[in-house]
Every structure is written in C-alpha cells, then in structure tokens.
Image (cartoon, helix red, strand yellow):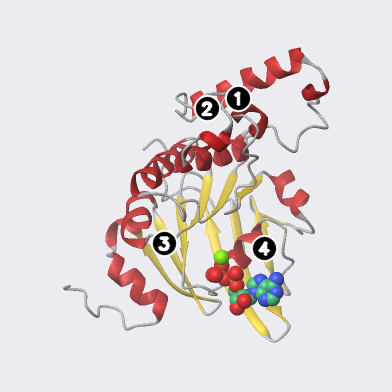
Amino acid sequence: MALDRVVAEPILELEGISKSYGGVKALTDVSLTLRPGEVVALVGDNGAGKSTLVKTMAGVVKPDKGRYTFEGKNVSINGPSDASDLGIQTVYQDLSLCNNLDAVQNLFLGREQTLPWWRGGRIQRAECEVRARQVLRKLRLDSIALDRNVGAMSGGQRQNIAIARSILWEPKVVLLDEPTAALSHSAAEQVGVLIRELAAHGLAVLVISHDIHHFVIDVTDRIEVLRLGQNAASFSSKDVTGERVVNAMVGGEEGINSAG
Ligand SMILES: Nc1ncnc2c1ncn2[C@@H]1O[C@H](COP(=O)(O)OP(=O)(O)O)[C@@H](O)[C@H]1O
Ligand SMILES: [Mg+2]
C-alpha cells in the first residue's frame, strides 16, 4: 500500500454528534474519524442511525449538537453545498441515475449549468466524453460503454457509474450508503474493487453495508458499529470475525459463538 494508514492524519472528524427527530433519538454523542486512504465500514441494525450519520456528514441533516472538523479545522456545515465545497461527495442508495440516458449523460447529470451540451453543443459532448473516459480509466472501469443507456447495464455497472460520478470533481471524501444492497455477490465484488481503488488514490471512504461476512470484512480497513444511535464498537477489519461484528451490532456479548 502506498499510503501508511496508521499515520495518516484524520481528514474528517465528528465528535459528540446528537440528533433527535421529535422523541426519537437517532444519534446520541456519536464520534467518527475518517482518514485519507482508509475505507471505513459503518454497520448497525436497521434504525441504528447509519443514514442519519452519513447525512450529517453530507450536510443534509443538521445535528442538534456536536463538532465537525475537516482537515484539522472546525467547520460549520449548513447544507449539502458546504460539504461538497469541502470535497465530500455522497452516493445514496437510490443512485439517482436516469435509465434512459447513457453513461456520459449520467456522469454529468445535474451539472447542466456548466455543460449544456444537449441544447445543441457537439463539442461539449465531446469534452464530456473525454473527461468521462479519463475518470473511468483512472478507476479501471474502461469496460463501461459510454454511449449505452444505463438502464441496460448490470446492477454492478450502474453502481460503479454512480460512484464514478461522485468522484468526477475530485473529492477528498466519498460516503456510500449501502452500495451493494441490491447486488449479486459478483457485482458486489466489482464495487468492492472500485472502492479499494478510491482509497488507493488517497480518498477517505465511508461505506454503509449489511454484508458483514463478505463485503465488510473483505473490502474495508476498519469497522465502526452503531447500536441504537450510539457508538457500540470499533474493529480493525483484518483482526475480527464477522460473528464478533454481528454480536456488537445486536448487543450480544462479545466472543459468544466465536467458535461457530
Ligand atoms: N427524517 C426522519 N424523521 C423522523 N425520524 C427519522 C428520520 N430519519 C431517521 N429517523 C429515525 O431515526 C432513527 C435512525 O434512522 P436511520 O439513520 O435511517 O438508521 P439506519 O440508516 O441505521 O437504518 C430511526 O429510528 C429512524 O426511524
Ligand atoms: Mg439507512
């Protein structure tokens, strides 16, 4: 590995984050640290607060209290554009891809203000293709056909296009909410390879996943467990079994069933 994950300074640090929705405490005093070159898994049962924590990092949810530090500086995040200005990109579960558009169009979706090529500009389309090809090559996704409608692509390819889109403008942090939820085992493996590629380029990656025994253990470096909106455990992925992680998720005693 080119980067020494042990000594890399944190890029994003959340401390003491709490968020309630009416009477529901979604997060209570949660802390989380991301470092360049490291892939962190965020795991927990349904309702544990994973998505709320990701949305807090993405500026979509404003926490009731807590500190947000980016590159060593205390920052105030008041909306998604504040997070994206810092270089934080999020890929949500629904992907927000348009099935009737091709890969290039999807990569530049939502950036029409700077690239209005479908109002007639052939040259701009060509520029988009060049940039798309660069990004896909950098991510070793050359096999994706640029001019094919994404609706005709496999789930793994669609997920990879959504991830590629998030890194088009060279973020420093990528947050992924369940990128493998709807995927077959082999498609999830493809996405895992891409996620390692992002970290190899020095990005900090946070990924929510329920696939503890394969994806989380195999792809990530560190596992952060949320339970009932609180930090429950933290593991180095190479030193832990899936069973121990699952026990921490459900609040079972650590070590139970570890022989099975
Ligand atoms: N917008 C919301 N309004 C009300 N309650 C919410 C909202 N978002 C999340 N919650 C609640 O907060 C808790 C944590 O939810 P969430 O972060 O989605 O958990 P997870 O992603 O781990 O399944 C749940 O009890 C959920 O019902
Ligand atoms: Mg969720």
Q: Which mark is residue 223?
A: 3
If you read the primary sequence from the N terminus, does the residue marked by circle 2 or circle 3 appear first?
A: 2
The x, y position of residue 101, in whole percent, is 65, 32
Instruction: Give the quarter of the image for residue 164.
Output: top right
Residue occupying the point 66% across, 83% down: 24
Mark 4 Cα-neighbour bin, 10 Å: few <14, some 14–19, many ≥20: many
Question: At numbered mark 1, what does the secondary structure look like: helix, strand or loop?
Answer: helix
Relative to the observer, which residue lies in front, 181 or 166? Answer: 181
Amino acid type shown at disc 2: Leu
Amino acid type shown at disc 3: Ile
Q: Quadrant of ligand 2?
A: bottom right
If you read the primary sequence from the N terminus, does the residue marked by circle 1 or circle 4 appear first?
A: 4
Question: At numbered mark 4, what does the secondary structure look like: helix, strand or loop?
Answer: helix
Tell me the CA gap for discs 2 and 1: 6 Å
Amino acid type shown at disc 1: Ala
Mark 2 Cα-neighbour bin, 10 Å: few <14, some 14–19, many ≥20: some
Residue occupying the point 57% across, 23% down: 146
Task: Tell me if label 2 and label 3 are in contact, CB under 8 Å.
Answer: no
Tell me the CA gap for discs 1 and 4: 29 Å
The x, y position of residue 82, in whole percent, is 76, 51
Amino acid type shown at disc 4: Thr
From this view, report whether residue 105 is shown above or below residue 92: above
Look at mark 1 in the image and give the residue it sits on: 132
Mark 1 Cα-neighbour bin, 10 Å: few <14, some 14–19, many ≥20: many
If you read the primary sequence from the N terminus, does the residue marked by circle 4 or circle 3 appear first?
A: 4
Instruction: Give the quarter of the image for residue 41.
Output: bottom left
Q: Nearer the viewer, mark 2 or mark 3?
A: 2
Question: At numbered mark 3, what does the secondary structure look like: helix, strand or loop?
Answer: strand
Q: State the residue lying farthest toward the top.
A: 123
Tell me the CA gap for discs 4 and 3: 19 Å
Q: State the residue lying farthest toward the left.
A: 259
